[in-house]
Image: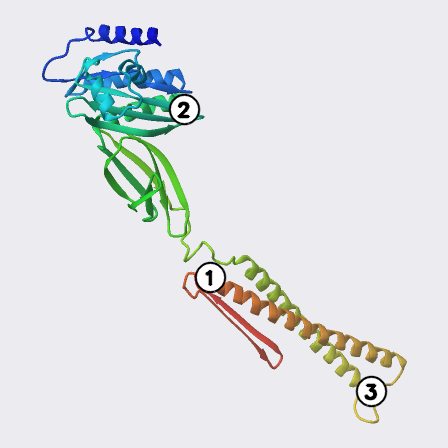
Amino acid sequence: MKLRLFLATLMLTLLCFSHQVSAQDTSVVVLKFEEFNVDQSISAAFYNGLVAGIEDHPDMKVSSSGELTLQDLMLAMGCESPNVECLSGLSAMVPGNQMVFGQVQQSDDVVLFTVRQFDFAEQRFVREVSDMSVKGTAGQIIDAVPAVIENFLYGPVGVLEVAVQGGSPELFLNGDKVGRAPTILENLPLGEHVVMVRDSSGVEKSETVILRRGETGVVSFDLGGVADPGSISGAPSAVPGWILVGVGAAGIGFGIFQTLQVGSIDDDFAALCAEPGNVCEGADASLSGPEAASRARTLADDGGTAKTLQLVGFSVGGAALAVGGYLLYRSYSYSGEETVSFQVSPSKDGFQAGMGIKF
């Protein structure tokens, strides 16, 4: 314990003489950040970028940066918690007007950054970013580090343009509804944001964007392929209707063919009855011979079969046309346009059916 306290005091003494800062700038000491399971390339990029960002700030200059963490200073000071009283007491040990410290922690592909800047004269935090998250590979996180630093140094100065084709959906930023797109959002925190749009049917699309100072972030969504709930999406399919209409047309055609068969058989039977010696009606009905009698029985059987098939064809065809026409009506009129009309009715010789479709 005594050795650690001695080393901490020695390091602070050396740091006090490490830099000279002009009077008009706020001198800032950047302490070493605490790290928890962080890729070293990420922590190095963040710390070096933070020191460079403060050095480039128009109102601040780095007076020192080194290997001491806040915990080291608290140990040297005898503090147990980083409250305002403890931090204010560190002014005698820190060669600057302000002190920047914090921590970086990583879990899988997510890194959390916490950065605080304490002013000794005002005895308060003048800048603070807590648990700012960036998700991705090490390279992607390193690319986002400048935005994290700019957000800490310059605050919410981000600008985001959300472009949308095919509608005006609800707009969400990091899970919070912020209006409707397309739009331009200003005064946003710099860094990574998740932008999501949701159309009236509930379909959602999202993109991740990193906002930088002095640049307008742009995300675009194409909702042209998303169906509107009042028309295409949820509309009944026209395929079953067309299949039934086809079956109905075939049935009606079969019934018409059997009607022609019945007429032909009736003509053949009438011709048989007209032959000399044949009587086909009344109590004295008789035929001239066995051949004529056999022919009459065949015609009678064929006629009965044709009439049965005629009835089946018209019945099945009419029913299929009726159901198919109804399904087509539902499908094509789902959007509110009555594009299909259908009529089926009996007639003296069978059925009459008609259907009209507007395109």
Provide the secondary structure element on which disc 3 rests. loop
Residue 180 shows up from this direction: no
Callout in the foreground (2, 1)? 2
Q: Nearer the viewer, mark 3 or mark 1?
A: 1
Q: Earlier in the sequence, mark 3 or mark 2?
A: 2
Report crowding for label 3: few under 14, some 14 to 19, many 20 or more residues within 10 A (C-alpha).
few
The C terminus sits in image quarter: bottom left
Residue projecting furthest to the right: 290
Give amino acid for label 3.
Pro
Where is residue 181 shown, x and y percent of the image?
Answer: 30, 45
Q: Which mark is residue 106?
A: 2
Distance, label 3 to label 1, CA atoms, is: 62 Å
Residue 145 at what x, y percent from top left? 31, 23
**The label number, if any, that marks residue 276 in the structure image:** 3
Of residues 257 and 10, the one nearer the viewer is 10
Quadrant of the rendered structure where residue 8 is?
Answer: top left
Q: Secondary structure at mark 2?
A: strand
Q: Are marks 3 and 2 in contact (CB under 8 Å)?
A: no
Indicate the quadrant containing the N terminus: top left, top right, bottom left or bottom right: top left
Amino acid carrying mark 1 in the image: Tyr
Left or right of 202? Residue 321 is: right
Q: Which residue is mark 1?
A: 332
Q: How is the image coloured?
A: rainbow
